[in-house]
Image (cartoon, rainbow, N blue to C red):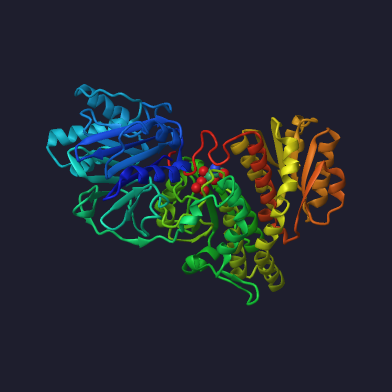
Amino acid sequence: MCGIVGYIGDKKAYPILIKGLSRLEYRGYDSAGVALIQDGKILNVYKRQGKVQDLVDFANDFSTEGTVGIGHTRWATHGEPNDVNAHPHFSGDENIVLVHNGIIENYEIIKKELTKRGHEFKTETDTEVLVHLIEEIKENSQVSIEEAVRMALKEVHGAYAIVLISKDSPDKIIAARKSSPLVIGLGEDEYYVASDATPIVEYTKNVVYLEDEQIAIVDRKNGLRIISIGNTEVSPYVQELEMQLEELEKGGYDHFMLKEIYEQPRAIHDSFRGRLNAAESWIALGGIRDYENQIANADRIVIIACGTSWHAGLVGEYLIEDLARIPVEVEYASEFRYRNPIIRPNDVVIAISQSGETADTLAALKMAKEEGATLLGIVNVVGSSISRVTDAGSYTHAGPEIGVASTKAFTTQVTILAMMAMLLAKKRGTINQTRFQNLLNEMEAIPEKIEYLLTSNDYIKGIADNYKDAANALFLGRGSCFPIALEGALKLKEISYIHAEGYPAAEMKHGPIALIDENMPVFVIATQGPNYEKVVSNIQEVKARKGKIIAIVTKGDTIVKDIADHYIEIPETDELLVPILATVPFQLISYHIAVMRGCNVDQPRNLAKSVTVE
Ligand code: M6R
């Protein structure tokens, strides 16, 4: 969380920083700030509580000159989100300014030490402590700014991506990372630094991803130099970005979330393109080819993830166990890493993450690595930390997801998991050719079926209107659609702030049924399949208590349609692929309810897209 950006070159830095911060705003939007060096000697810092636009409105009255600068958009960890705690933060002598993404865990101890030495702190942040520490070392040891940064970082514990500039070295930007991402863009005699490539892509496609415990020294004349915290030289590995600028724009939609919902046919198609061919009856996941035997013979698969990605993992458990008959456990990364789990060398651990930067997932992976497990990733952001820590993996190819609520990332994660399950089943001989072929055919048809589903958007909006004032909601599903009930509930609560819970439909009678009255909307997945009649009984139980039923049914259903208050039809598909289709109406319902309630759909309160703190 928090987005950071920096620029040094011949252009005016301020517009580049502001545009970059707007692109990174999805990472945090409690406050924003910039620092600019004007004429090589004046350090101007502007920061404001609120959005990047609040900063722009404020800075309008002041000079924004300068060709070197840094910026920050904050998701508060230490200290409330106000103007004072906003980044950048100054050193005591106001010569150095620094922006930071992450948490310095031992900041209180360092702060006490520095206070004893006469430092005075103006904010409640851990970041201010770090910039004072750098200042202290620079003064005491009489070293360059980059050496002071290196020495300071040896003393701090925790996670950081930092970028700083200083009045004494006005032609340099120093950046460093540990467990929080940083990318450096290489232009013509100009350099960009950012938390991800989105602020960079319109200026250059050549980037260097900084690795953990590396420091980048970007010098206007001498270019980019990278050293490790242990002080060894590192040759920069330049990669080419595949991202397109249009992917970062709303493209005529009111919100990124709606655009991303509508992108799902394309995104899912991209996630299986070149990996599956129904006419020729094959499936191949190039990224894990070398590990196929190992996965097929694993004692068990452990899936680790957070939030929506964890829900995808739960669907994966149903798919892999059902088709490939390999035991699967799905763990919250945040619990897994702290509960002394049993991990054996013959386990395969799969991390699922849209951003590839989620701190808990990354830490859980590192722990599994130490125990000798094979690590795979199902990740969207190319070049992200998780994709680099894992032994192998499959990118989801969903394209940039900007809306904080995950949509296309989820359905593409499930697509990859379905392909993995089919591949492993084929390899282990646990699927017959007829079922395999049917699944291939059905998978290829999913994008078209979602296109069809999206034509019901206005109808779904009409249904949403009935429930926009609800205080609570229940989501029910069974089998592989139980995780879709969890995902539906998460979507509704995170963007509309309506309290919602997801349950396996049959569990309702063990408690949640007590909540049901005429004010309770109950969203139920009641598609055709082995559990259909059981779910119909659950619906009757809700109706008997005057609850309102909004049912997702298979096209052509007659029974549930008659009982439900509202129904949404989804096209028929293989039972194991229903989760992908059933997700879409829940995304649209949540979206419309949130818009009707006047909520900030793309940037819900208190959240951030990329959770790089524990
Ligand atoms: O980037 P990741 O997939 O690792 O992120 C995990 C969660 O933070 C994320 O899915 C979160 O729950 C979303 N806001 C849900 O829409």
Q: Which quadrant of the figure has residue 49?
A: top left
| Along the line of sight, the residue nearer the viewer: 132 or 390 | 132
Position of the N terminus, as image quadrant, is top left
**Residue at 68 percent of width and 71 percent of height:** 437
Q: Nearer the viewer, residue 295 or 573?
A: 573
Residue lying at 44% horizontally and 61% vertically, measured from the top left: 242
- Residue 606 visible to an observer of this rendering: yes
Q: Position of residue 117 (x, y in %)?
A: 19, 24
476 relative to 49 in the view: left or right: right
Query: Residue 34 placed where, x, y %?
Result: 34, 37
* The quarter of the displayed image where residue 449 is located: bottom right
Furthest residue to the bottom? 280
Residue at point 72%, 40% (across, down): 464
Report the quarter where the C terminus lies. top left
Residue at image position (68%, 62%) is 448
Q: Is residue 359 visible?
A: no
Q: Position of residue 100 (x, y in %)?
A: 34, 38
Q: Nearer the viewer, residue 15 or 223?
A: 15
Q: Is residue 299 left or right of residue 467?
A: left
The answer to whether residue 144 is left or right of residue 438 is: left
Q: Position of residue 543 (x, y in %)?
A: 84, 37
Name the foreground residue: 184 vs 250: 250
